[in-house]
Amino acid sequence: MDTLTIPDGLEVARVKSEKLSAEPNFLEYLEFTDRKINQICYEVLHNIIKAVGEGRTVNLIVPLNGGLLFYRKLMELFSNLELSTNALNIIFCDEDESDRLLFSQEPLDVTNAYNIVIDDIWDKGGTGSEIIEELRTFGAVDTLDYFAFCRKESSPTQNNGARLANMDSVTIFEDRWLHNWGGMNSSLFKDRPRVTALERTSFLPLVPLPEYLQVKFNTQDPFTVDAYMDLLTQTNLAVNGVIPIEVFNDVLFLEENPSLVTRFDYMTKLHARIAQSIETSKIKVDREG
């Protein structure tokens, strides 16, 4: 397990730096984040390949919006494998207006399948518990593997059959840095309410964006913090080149369209385009080979 030390007295970046490495702690956090994202995605990929080799269906569940980081990276890795994207049944999940967790499509052969989640944060395992309960409406499910970037020191390792599957690679943070709902505790930052020093998943120093892209919120208003924290997360990682810049556009669309039907439709069509692109490139390589 990795523990990333958060330096005391981190301040917001005051000017837009032309040289990213000039930002305090930038290289350290960039290397850490890049390494962890790759490490976790390769673990997930290993488990998927093993399950497919055993003849099992794989239901890969991606919570919106935190799982997008790893979904995009995983699809990128799939482009270098002989394994077809058809081996995966991708399910996006999110809560509706009544806070009930729903799936974008039905899981397949849920009782015998390898059911797996990729997400940014494991707190008390509440999301994992909700996901496994929804899976159980389609059949008997005893366990659910949950892969996450980080967890709190006090986080349990299991909840209702959902288990934190990457105990060796998950990053541990002090409880005070994370809120119960999975967001960064922005009250610990200087110069609040504008949070530009760290973001919740990678804890990289944020490079200030142009004014029209800056997101501001009131730390005393949980609604505004919750509404924009995902956007900050994805923006930061995209700007710093850890994951594709397209993720920023994905999250921007999802944040601007709260309707679950619209969000699921967007992600389903996005996955179809990505999967088609991967399969087409593999056919091209085979023909050229």
Image (cartoon, grey):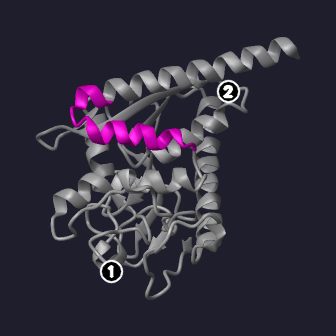
Q: Which mark is residue 188?
A: 1
Residue at the far bottom: name it.
8
Which of the 4 image quarters holds residue 53? Answer: top right
Residue at point 25%, 52% (across, down): 227
Circle 2: element type? loop
Q: Please name whichever residue, 139 or 78, is drawn nearer the observer in this view of the structure.
A: 78
Query: Which kind of residue does numbered mark 1 sit on?
Result: Leu
In this rendering, the count of numbered labels is 2
Q: CA distance from mark 2 to mark 1?
A: 45 Å
Residue at point 27%, 26% (across, down): 262
Q: Quick check: is 106 in the magenta stretch? A: no
Dominant SS type (magenta): helix
- Among numbered discs 2 and 1, the one appearing first in the sequence: 2
Residue 104 visible, this orientation: no
Q: Quick check: is 248 in the magenta stretch? A: yes
Residue at point 47%, 72% (across, down): 172
* Quarter of the figure with the N terminus: bottom right
Q: What residue is shown with label 2?
A: 83
Q: Please name whichever residue, 165 or 22, is drawn nearer the observer in this view of the structure.
A: 22
> Is 93 placed above or below 175 here?
above
Which of the 4 image quarters holds residue 49? Answer: top right
List x then y, in percent, for residue 244: 57, 43
Q: Which residues are magenta?
A: 244-263
Q: Residues within 10 Å of mark 2 (few under 14, many from 20)?
A: some
Residue 22 visible, this orientation: yes
> Is 256 placed above or below 29 here?
above
List x then y, in percent, for residue 63: 36, 43
Query: Which kind of residue does numbered mark 2 sit on?
Result: Leu
* Quarter of the figure with the C terminus: top right
